[in-house]
Image: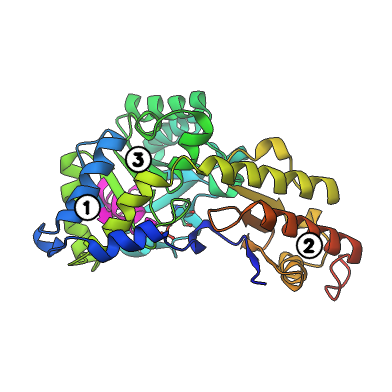
Amino acid sequence: MSPVDLRSDTVTTPTPEMRAAMADAEVGDDAYGEDPTVNRLESLAAALLGTEAALFVPSGTMANQLALAVLASAGDEVGCAARAHVLRHESGGAAANWGIQLRSFADPQGVIDATAIDAAVADQRHHLPPFVAVAVENTAMAASGRPWPADALAAVVDATRRHGLGLHIDGARIWNAAVATGRSPAELSAGADTVMFCLSKGLAAPVGSVLCGGADHVAAARDLRHRLGGAMRQAGVLAAAGIVALETMVERLVDDHARARRLAHALADRFPGSVDPASVETNIVCVPAAALPGASPDAFVAALAAEGVRAGTIDARTVRFVTHKDVDDHDITRAVAAFDAVARSGAPGAGARD
Ligand SMILES: Cc1ncc(COP(=O)(O)O)c(C=O)c1O
């Protein structure tokens, strides 16, 4: 039996419909703007997000990096959550690629308090760097994929508008946020200058993300994508899967959310204090390793792997479980049985926690 893979929603494989669309895709050279399928995906994405334009890119990381470069220059500061992907998981790209400094704001429950933006703007008068933009992550991955509450998001949009700042939304999982909150991706990104979403996570396409925004921003991002080597020629074979992803894979995310909640309840029952199930609203469960048996997150993950269940870690303190279309109810039952086995054994071989 193959292991239950809860490491990430990026492990999903394309659906048969995606594979058929890829095989039949009409293609051209996208670097000349001549790939009809890429153009169709970009038009669809812009329409769904309510923006003037969109750009297909190989990854969410590239989309975020392009957005930062469009909204800020070397020496500028961009604010983001302390656990944001742009800050922690992009190999220092903001600094290394563009000379942009990221300023981290406290993010209890993944959300930035808008007053931190007011303070960052006020700081500039005291010889702090030019503070030019804010990046918001929705859903907030490290906070168990929490979707931003409407009022918190509105306050950040308002602060950026009042201060004339740029606003980027890392919406890698904006479709999960949309399904969980009942608000459309266009509503969730209203007031932002740029928003990116991933096709290759919960929507299960094999490759790709889309950066959406105003025509000028997207044109600038298109030039920078070329500089990074991200112009992909007959990329319509990939975009075709992305179109199927947008058309067929959004509504089913509700099942992933229910399964993540089931995992959260099972973890809370077996490992008291590990997770508050009410905080799990989408497809991610992040658990502080201190609340789990075993000497380290890796030890807990290894003990689960021995029971046929793969989990991941996002840092040296946090274990992560992610549900997706290649995990069904039976797999969740297997995962819960693995939790039982580890709870009984106390993570054998892992040594005692001191
Ligand atoms: C919140 C968030 N933003 C951006 C990314 C980057 O996406 P990619 O892996 O396609 O570069 C990820 C990837 O996991 C993510 O979780």
Q: Residue at x 55, y 40 (%)?
A: 254
Task: Mark yes or no: residue 268 visible.
Answer: yes
Looking at the picture, tell me which residue is in the foreground, 137 or 155.
Answer: 137
Query: Which is in the foreground here, disc 2 or disc 1?
Result: 2
Q: Residues within 10 Å of mark 3 (few under 14, many from 20)?
A: many
Which residue has dot 3 on it? 133
Residue 47 as seen in the image, left or right of residue 188: left
Which residue has dot 1 on it? 221
Residue 230 figure quarter: bottom left
Looking at the picture, tell me which residue is in the foreground, 71 or 215.
Answer: 215
Magenta stretch encompasses residue 347? no
Q: Residues within 10 Å of mark 1 (few under 14, many from 20)?
A: many
Question: Which residue of the protein is positioned furthest toward the bottom in this rendering?
Answer: 349
Which numbered disc, 1 or 3, marks the residue that appears first in the sequence? 3
Which residue has dot 2 on it? 338
Q: Residue at x 44, y 25 (%)?
A: 154
Magenta stretch encompasses residue 66? yes
